[in-house]
Image (tube, helix red, strand yellow):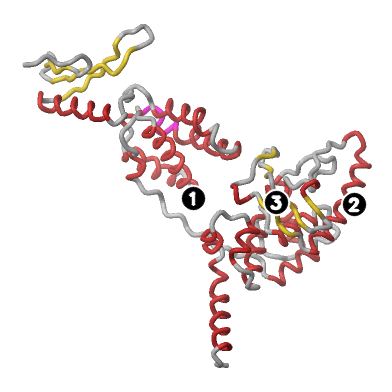
């Protein structure tokens, strides 16, 4: 029988009757060989496992380390991959999921032994603990991304998360304010310190972070346009927009221009009153001393305003929905609405505002009747 070449591995029988295939996987810092043992009940099975190992080696999966735990890998993934590829706010969300959910539940399991059953138990447990289906779906997405990176790095051969479906997420039904309710809102905030903020939200359809990061240098009141080039996170730090398509120039309505002119006059008075306490950031919407607004305070202002005007409860983001729904209802082309909102694909716009489609389709049918001579 020919002798195995160096590194091919060897098969022998142990004292307890099992068979073991041993192969060198690398060398440590002192130059000593790192050996991996593959145990089996028969010599044939041990030989098969050894061949599988060499097949993995040929496909670039030679870095399998049975000692690396999921917890260790999650931490490495966060620091080496997530931290340098996503926005700080996104990183904080990933880190929170890893720290609060993934490591406590899966951290002690070795990465090589992570199985679909572990993922199923994780999903079921988190739903039982009261996490919403949407939150659990996001948690599964984080786990899938972490494991997929391990596959890409050649640490494991497949992504077991792909074999486990997440919970169904109820479709969010957009119920924005209608035109009459929006007029009530705009009339009701006239003269409010942050009235211009809500007027811009309704007439421009900007995201909350985009509005709170808007700088005067990016607003041209004469040309009636605003450049969207940054966003404000919940920690009140400025960052990049959500996507490339989120960088855009939007036209300002006359309502928005008038509101911003009066808002700027008010802000100049606040700057004079604050004196040395003023902290200049160049932002359009600020606190009374010039610092960025807290998103939670803005949300409370909207809530109190809606209650005062006896209007239905709305999230700040729902004002963006109201703007888009109103434009589509007025037969503004969906592509134009997509560009104004900063969506990356028109399918995103149409899926979000499918509730507007029946009326648009009915009007299309009526137009056909008019063109073809049917009253």
Q: Is residue 108 rendered magenta in the image?
A: yes
Please give the residue where the numbered disc 1 appears in the rendered image.
Answer: 134
The crowding category of the residue bearing disc 1, from other C-alpha atoms within 10 Å (few below 14, some 14 to 19, many at least 20), is some
Is 65 placed above or below 299 here? Answer: above
Residue 338 picture location, percent across and down: 60, 60
Per the rendered image, the range of residues in magenta is 103-109
Q: Secondary structure at mark 2?
A: helix
Which of the two discs, 2 and 3, labels the residue nearer the N terminus? 2
Q: Are marks 2 and 3 in contact (CB under 8 Å)?
A: no
Q: Is residue 67 left or right of residue 42?
A: right
Q: Is residue 9 rendered magenta in the image?
A: no
Q: Dividing the image into 4 quarters, which one contains the N terminus? A: top left
Please give the residue where the numbered disc 2 appears in the rendered image.
Answer: 265
Which of the two discs, 1 and 2, labels the residue nearer the N terminus? 1
Please give the residue where the numbered disc 3 appears in the rendered image.
Answer: 299
Residue 148 picture location, percent across and down: 39, 37
Q: How far apart are the two marked residues, 2 and 3, measured between alpha carbons?
A: 24 Å
Residue at the far top in the pictured view: 30
Is 42 placed above or below 323 here? Answer: above
Q: How far apart are the two marked residues, 1 and 2, measured between alpha carbons?
A: 43 Å
Is 110 placed above or below 283 here? Answer: above
Q: Secondary structure at mark 3?
A: helix
1 vs 2, front mark: 2
Residue beneath the point at 80% across and 63% down: 255
Q: Are marks 1 and 2 in contact (CB under 8 Å)?
A: no
Q: Is residue 34 left or right of residue 128?
A: left
The crowding category of the residue bearing disc 3, from other C-alpha atoms within 10 Å (few below 14, some 14 to 19, many at least 20), is some
Snapshot quadrant of residue 178: bottom right
Is 89 placed above or below 253 here? Answer: above
Residue beneath the point at 52% across and 62% down: 351
Which of the two discs, 3 and 1, labels the residue nearer the N terminus? 1
Q: Are marks 3 and 1 in contact (CB under 8 Å)?
A: no
């Amino acid at each position: 029988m020919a002798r195995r070449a160096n590194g091919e591995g060897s098969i022998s029988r142990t004292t307890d009757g099992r068979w073991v295939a041993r192969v060198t996987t690398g060398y440590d810092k002192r130059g000593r060989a790192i050996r991996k043992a593959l145990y089996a009940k028969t010599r044939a099975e041990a030989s098969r496992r050894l061949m599988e190992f060499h097949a993995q080696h040929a496909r670039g999966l030679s870095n399998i380390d049975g000692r690396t735990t999921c917890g260790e890998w999650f931490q490495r993934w966060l620091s080496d991959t997530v931290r340098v590829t996503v926005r700080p706010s996104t990183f904080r969300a990933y880190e929170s999921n890893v720290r609060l959910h993934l490591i406590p539940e899966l951290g002690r399991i070795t990465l090589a032994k992570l199985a679909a059953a572990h993922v199923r138990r994780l999903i079921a447990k988190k739903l039982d603990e009261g996490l919403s289906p949407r939150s659990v779906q996001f948690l599964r997405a984080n786990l899938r991304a972490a494991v997929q990176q391990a596959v890409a790095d050649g640490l494991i051969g497949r992504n077991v998360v792909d074999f486990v479906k997440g919970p169904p997420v109820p479709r969010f039904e957009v119920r924005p304010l209608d035109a009459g309710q929006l007029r009530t809102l705009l009339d009701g905030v006239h003269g409010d310190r942050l009235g211009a903020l809500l007027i811009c939200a309704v007439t421009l359809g900007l995201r909350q972070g985009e509005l709170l990061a808007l700088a005067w240098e990016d607003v041209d009141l004469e040309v009636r346009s605003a450049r969207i080039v940054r966003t404000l996170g919940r920690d009140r730090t400025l960052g990049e927009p959500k996507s490339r398509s989120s960088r855009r120039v939007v036209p300002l309505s006359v309502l928005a221009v008038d509101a911003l002119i009066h808002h700027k006059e008010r802000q100049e008075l606040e700057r004079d009153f604050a004196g040395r306490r003023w902290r200049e950031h160049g932002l359009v919407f600020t606190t009374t001393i010039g610092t960025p607004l807290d998103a939670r305070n803005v949300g409370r202002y909207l809530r109190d305003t809606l209650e005062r005007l006896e209007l239905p409860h709305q999230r700040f983001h729902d004002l963006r929905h109201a703007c888009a729904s109103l434009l589509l209802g007025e037969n503004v082309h969906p592509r134009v609405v997509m560009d104004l909102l900063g969506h990356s694909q028109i399918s995103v716009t149409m899926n979000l505002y499918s509730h507007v489609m029946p009326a648009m389709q009915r009007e299309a049918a009526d137009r056909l009747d008019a063109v073809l001579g049917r009253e």
